[in-house]
Amino acid sequence: MADPIKMVRIPSLKNVAEFRSHVASLGIEIPCEEEIVSGERSPLAQPLAERLVNGKKIGNRFAVQPMEGWDGTRTGGVTPEVTRRWQRFGESGAKLICGGEAMAVRADGRANPNQLIINEHNKADLAQLRNDLLTAHRQRYGQAEDVIIGFQLTHSGRFCKPTDKLRLEPRLAYRHPILDRKFGVASGDQVWTDDEVDRLVEDFVRAARVAWETGADFVDIKHCHGYLLHEFLSAFTRPGKYGGSFENRTRILREIISGIRADSNKIEIAVRLSAFDFVPFRPDPAGSLPGKPGVGIPEDFSGCLPYRFGFGTDKDNPLRYDLTEPERFLQLCSELGVKIVNISAGSPYYNPHIQRPAAYPPSDGYQPPEDPLVGVARHLEVVRRLKASAPKELIFVGSAYSYLQEYLPHVAQYVVRNRWTDLVGLGRMVLAYPTILADAVNTGTLNKRSICRTFSDCTTAPRYGLLSGCYPLDQYYAAKPESDELKAKKKGAR
Ligand SMILES: Cc1cc2nc3c(=O)[nH]c(=O)nc-3n(C[C@H](O)[C@H](O)[C@H](O)COP(=O)(O)O)c2cc1C
Ligand code: SF4
């Protein structure tokens, strides 16, 4: 049986010295500046002057990561919850809104029946959403000229749930020996034909046109987290023009971008990439109790070697990354004129510990198999290596900083100052404490009671079909009836 790790909780560390010594005890590297620097000297306050996006410079060095809330209308339009989330993105002080949230390019590609859909029907809603974010930013910070906003375009592929919050309706890039078993795929009927992919490319091109007409500065062509275009990057075993060689596996991106340009659409392009994948994990059955999944262990991959079912995965040991192809992919992005690359990893559905390191697992997860700081260090290192080898024109955004908690500003300052990344992207922390880095820059102090402690309720709630939000720390969600429902479901699972 896999033993639970002995985790030192971040709030129990009294200062930077203790944080550093804890990091050292784990044998990992997470650089951390001694003091939070406020005011104009803060590395996080510096605009990204030399690389413009849609003719504008990004006004500082922190970004909001895309985060959906499972809370649009049934036709993919905007609700008050969506508006509130985007207003809080605006209030965060971040000058790059790196996708907002995943928006499906067509109704059957939604990851849940309440995901936003980017189409003509919802265009006015999306334009208003963008305006609401800018207004909230302007009201708090005086102006919003240097805020750059993108929309993340997606098809959820293997993880589509377009009609029922709890029922997968997968569409696959290829048959995956482990994921098919894990998520109940029994036939090849759900594999895309090449003709269907050709039509999907047109959906992305149409969605980019809608984004441009609503005033978005860029679209993020989502290639991460096990969703469709990420899955195509590892379609080594797929026959035909979208599988096999690197050229074929990246064809969709090339076709989408050339389609956008053929449509005389000047919108800028970003790509969010899961730069590496590990084999799927599961809770160790020997250590699992009702409501308390066991420690994460890898699914049995002994029959799948060399492993040809992940992108950026070491084929001989799929518990390690291999950045050879991700580096090549970023080179291609640059050649295609992509401006921003937002580096993430893995998938929340099958290896959440590498994607969003957390102290407390979501309901469909497992106890952390490693200290979550190991996951944070892995992200930092991968972004540093990819950025060092990539063309200088690409703007890099890094992910998975939220677990750093009190030490997030200290680490963020270091990685920006030392060019490990151009921008620090914040996910869960923004749901709990949107202004954490604005507070660091403006006052040098944090409101500790608002810090995200990675309780994972924002992931667990949608797993039960409820709205996502920070139930533990955001009163707006704590006061909703869904909060009691979530508590009851979590208790019932015990
Ligand atoms: C509730 C929730 C919704 C998310 N939605 C998206 C999404 O729509 N698109 C995306 O690329 N990532 C999404 N993510 C992943 C985050 O953008 C981010 O990569 C992840 O949470 C790790 O960063 P963090 O440590 O700052 O939270 C979501 C994460 C959470 C918690
Ligand atoms: S529910 Fe709140 S505290 Fe928990 S991980 Fe999400 S944002 Fe953080």
Image: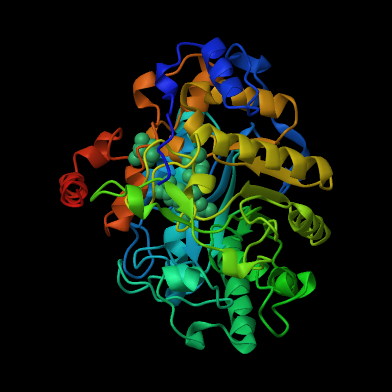
Left or right of 324: which side holds 243? left
* Along the line of sight, the residue nearer the viewer: 411 or 86: 411
**Could you tell whether 57 is left or right of 191 in the image?**
right
**Residue drawn at the location 56% of the way across and 54% of the way down:** 346
Q: Is residue 105 visible?
A: yes
Across and down, in percent, residue 229 comes to 60, 67
Report if residue 121 is visible in the image: no
Q: Where is residue 99 in the image (x, y as percent from the top left)?
A: 55, 52
Q: Which residue is drawn at 30% across and 35% down?
A: 474
Residue, far front = 1
Q: Where on the picture, by quarter, is residue 361?
A: top left
> How is the structure coloured here?
rainbow
Residue 160 placed where, x, y %? Answer: 43, 70
Classify residue 464 by image quadrant.
bottom left
Could you tell me which residue is drawn at 57 percent across and 21 percent down?
A: 25
**Number of on-image labels:** 0
Please, is residue 293 above or below residue 88 in the view? below
- Residue 62 is situated, as x and y percent measured from the top left of the image, at 59, 34
Nearer to the camera, 311 or 370: 370
Q: In this view, does 62 lie above or below 158?
A: above
- Residue 30 or residue 339, whichever sits in front: 30
Left or right of residue 273, residue 244 in this image = right
Placement of 114 over or under 50, stated as above or below: below
Would you say 397 lies left or right of 132 here? right
